[in-house]
Image (tube, rainbow, N blue to C red):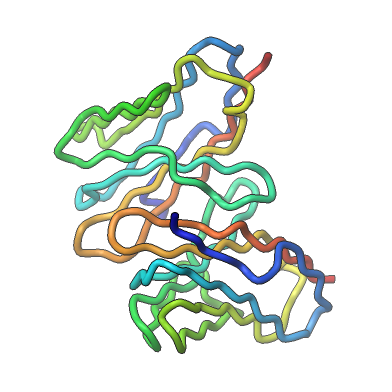
Amino acid sequence: DQQVKQNSPSLSVQEGRISILNCDYTNSMFDYFLWYKKYPAEGPTFLISISSIKDKNEDGRFTVFLNKSAKHLSLHIVPSQPGDSAVYFCAANYFTGNQFYFGTGTSLTVIP
Amino acid sequence: DVKVTQSSRYLVKRTGEKVFLECVQDMDHENMFWYRQDPGLGLRLIYFSYDVKMKEKGDIPEGYSVSREKKERFSLILESASTNQTSMYLCASSLVREAFFGQGTRLTVV
């Protein structure tokens, strides 16, 4: 049973525009959320995270928004660049657990 | 910088072989994980370990076993490799809130 879902397998965006990647979760115990970026033939790298006590966290071009009532988070990339083309994974965990729960990923293509 | 190192980037093995994938982390992290990544299925947890000699099954443990004899090293073992185990294997470690991944091992079973 997938507790973290990314319903869009792929997304294409023009360079310079905004990319919005979405993620939904079902487990209300999750209190920490992360986004990872993965290039082909490499391991995922941490991008940005957010605690459930916040509703927004920003780091340069990347902003993550959390809507706890909807159990939804999104990653905004502004402006999008061709180097952002990668697979993005949403992940969640909770304080008393050891595991990370990953979504199925969204493949972002930024068109020059 | 946290470093998680997987022993091989690419491996080709024959059906029925016993395969060992090794992972080493240098940050004294308690938790270590093995995932496999397949198109459309995301990252699926095979096994994880929260301490030396401790292990827990993940979502897809069948056909795999693990070993953690030292804190920094976590090994994934394919007892008898099959073609449906062809995949990208990813090792990760964490202390609490963030997982750090190795570069991945692309395993092909022929």
On screen, residue A75 versus residue A110, left or right, reads left
Q: Quadrant of the C terminus of chain A?
A: top right
On screen, residue A57 versus residue B2, left or right, reads left
Q: Residue furthest left?
A: A53
Residue at position x 46%, y 89% in the image: B69
Residue at position x 68%, y 61% in the image: B87
Q: Position of residue A68 (x, y in %)?
A: 20, 35
Q: Nearer the viewer, residue B105 or B38?
A: B105
Q: Residue furthest front?
A: B1
Residue at position x 44%, y 85% in the image: B70
Q: Nearer the viewer, residue B36 or A78?
A: A78
Q: Position of residue A78 (x, y in %)?
A: 45, 16
Q: Quadrant of the N terminus of chain A?
A: bottom left
User: Residue B37 occupies which quadrant of the picture?
Assistant: bottom right
Residue at position x 69%, y 50% in the image: A41
Q: Is residue A93 above or below residue B54?
A: above
Q: Position of residue B108 (x, y in %)?
A: 78, 66
